[in-house]
Image: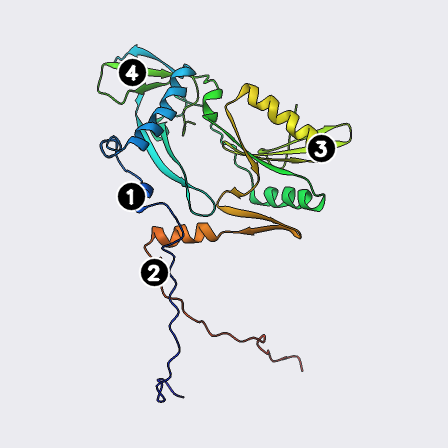
Amino acid sequence: METRSKSGIHKPRQVLSLTATSTASPSLQHTPSCFTEVVKYKHWRQAMSNEYNPLIFNNTWSLVRSDSTQHLIGCKWIFRVKLNSDGTLHKYKARLVAQGLKQLHGVDYEQTFSPVIKPATIRIVLTLAVSNQWSIRQLDIKNAFLNGALQETIFMKQLLVLSIVIIPLMCVYSRNRCFVQSTSDHSLFIYHHDGHTLYFLLYMDDIIFTGSSQKLLNSFITKLNTHFALTDLGELHYFLGIQVLKTSAGLLLSQRKYTYDLLQKYKMQNAHTVSTPSSLKPPTLKNHNR
């Protein structure tokens, strides 16, 4: 066996370069980790305003004086750079979240629930839509958690050090109805009317909406938009880290961007590919019964 070339001919090394997967500059993609870092940048300050203003508009909290009998939980800002399916910059996202881990069961809450669709449900509904050539729409509810009222009284500290605390009246992120909810997946809602069927898939504030009637789909999207701050993202193209490409044969699902993001996260975007030898034929096993 020859372990090195003796004729001066070498197999070209394949270099996997993924640095060009995003057209946004590294400085714009940088995700800040603290408030003092954020305030230096105008685009992050705007993202914070986009989060804070709806909180005030929806009367999410009321200010009260604190005392020793109250169980106080903290809050913090979370920042994230959101990219499109092709790696280009989509928007800067800032969220003011309550520190739900510091809540006491039986005092601050009794039960918690977050709507998360099962992967199998997504595949089944997409298969139905493709088989019947239905339109598949993607929606996003802005500040979705602010539309729910809390049953308990929660005391949350303000970001600034003051002797005033906040009583959240609405659901704040990370704190713990004509469609029929599926018994097999609580994040799937089904609607039947005049021989038509609509499927409503919910993952937190992201929605996949499809069905047998385009007119009915548009009607419900219009109604939703009158009650919630809704963003219609058009045809399904990116959901839960999966890129969706519509072709003449159906839907092509891939996680190319998600894979690139993982490589960048662990600084492996310039990693070298390795050819792994494998047999094209399945191994032959001896039949011991003979």
Kind of residue indicated by mark 3: Ser
Residues at marks 4 and 3, CA–CA distance in whole angstroms: 49 Å
Kind of residue indicated by mark 2: Asn
Q: Position of residue 8 (x, y in %)?
A: 34, 86
Residues at marks 3 and 1, CA–CA distance in whole angstroms: 45 Å
Q: Looking at the image, tell me whether mark 3 or mark 1 is earlier in sequence order.
A: 1
Taking 179 as reference, is 34 left or right?
Answer: left
Q: Position of residue 255 (x, y in %)?
A: 49, 51
Q: Looking at the image, tell me whether mark 2 or mark 1 is earlier in sequence order.
A: 1
Q: Determine which residue is flagged by label 1.
A: 27
Of residues 269 and 89, the one drawn nearer to the viewer in this rendering = 89
Residues at marks 2 and 4, CA–CA distance in whole angstroms: 49 Å
Image disc number at residue 226: none
Q: Looking at the image, tell me whether mark 4 or mark 3 is earlier in sequence order.
A: 4
Q: Determine which residue is flagged by label 2.
A: 270
Graded by Cα atoms within 10 Å as few (under 14), some (14 to 19) or many (20 or more), the crowding at tag 4 reads many
Q: Looking at the image, tell me whether mark 2 or mark 4 is earlier in sequence order.
A: 4
Q: Determine which residue is flagged by label 3.
A: 213
